[in-house]
Amino acid sequence: MLTLVVLPVVEGQTLPFTLDTGAGGTSLSVRFYRRFASEQPTWKASKTTDGGAGGNIVTSTFLIPSVTFALGGQNVTVHKLSVFPEEQHADVDALFGNMGEDVLQSVSSFTLDFPGMWVIMGTNLSDQRK
């Protein structure tokens, strides 16, 4: 299976994330937690519940008030993101997180060019409301 990897800039650092157009929200991995752990005092301890056919799994996480991603020509700010402080023994551990629909729904349109390996984000919807 092929996984789309994008390289947004977060706080001046280019970081690899997967982009999953079917994921409802963005989640941040243990690598993100380790890179930005100095900001932990502004984070709130939380729990994340993931469910499937085998039942629910509750994981300790931190809730980050907001993260701004510079991607495809736009700055997209996503609020209330969960970050995993420990490895999940899943694909999300390899990169800094998984970007979901919350990022894509923040812009008027987006273009994914798989052969050219680039992303273009349309106008930021919060800019259109001003």
Image (tube, rainbow, N blue to C red):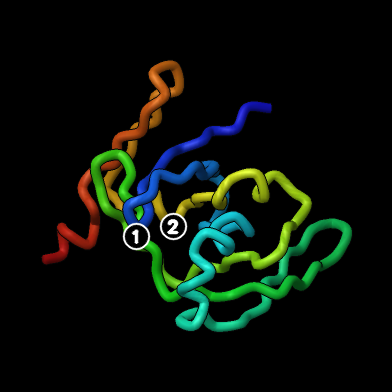
* 128 left or right, relative to 9: left
* Disc 1 residue type (three-letter): Thr
For the view shown, which residue lies furthest in the right direction? Answer: 54
**Local secondary structure at mark 2:** helix
For the view shown, which residue lies furthest in the front direction? Answer: 38
Q: Position of residue 13 (x, y in %)?
A: 38, 49
Q: Nearer the viewer, mark 2 or mark 1?
A: 1
* 121 left or right, relative to 31: left
* Disc 2 residue type (three-letter): Asp
The residue that mark 1 highlights is 68
Q: Position of residue 110 (x, y in %)?
A: 33, 39
Q: Nearer the viewer, residue 85 or 4?
A: 85
Whether residue 105 is visible, yes or no, is no
Indicate the quadrant containing the C terminus: top left, top right, bottom left or bottom right.
Answer: bottom left
Residue at image position (65%, 49%) is 92
Whether residue 83 is visible, yes or no, is yes
Q: What's the distance in space between the residues labelled 2 and 1, CA to CA?
A: 12 Å
Q: Nearer the viewer, residue 9 or 122?
A: 9
Residue at image position (49%, 82%) is 41
Q: Position of residue 88 (x, y in %)?
A: 74, 57
The residue that mark 2 highlights is 102
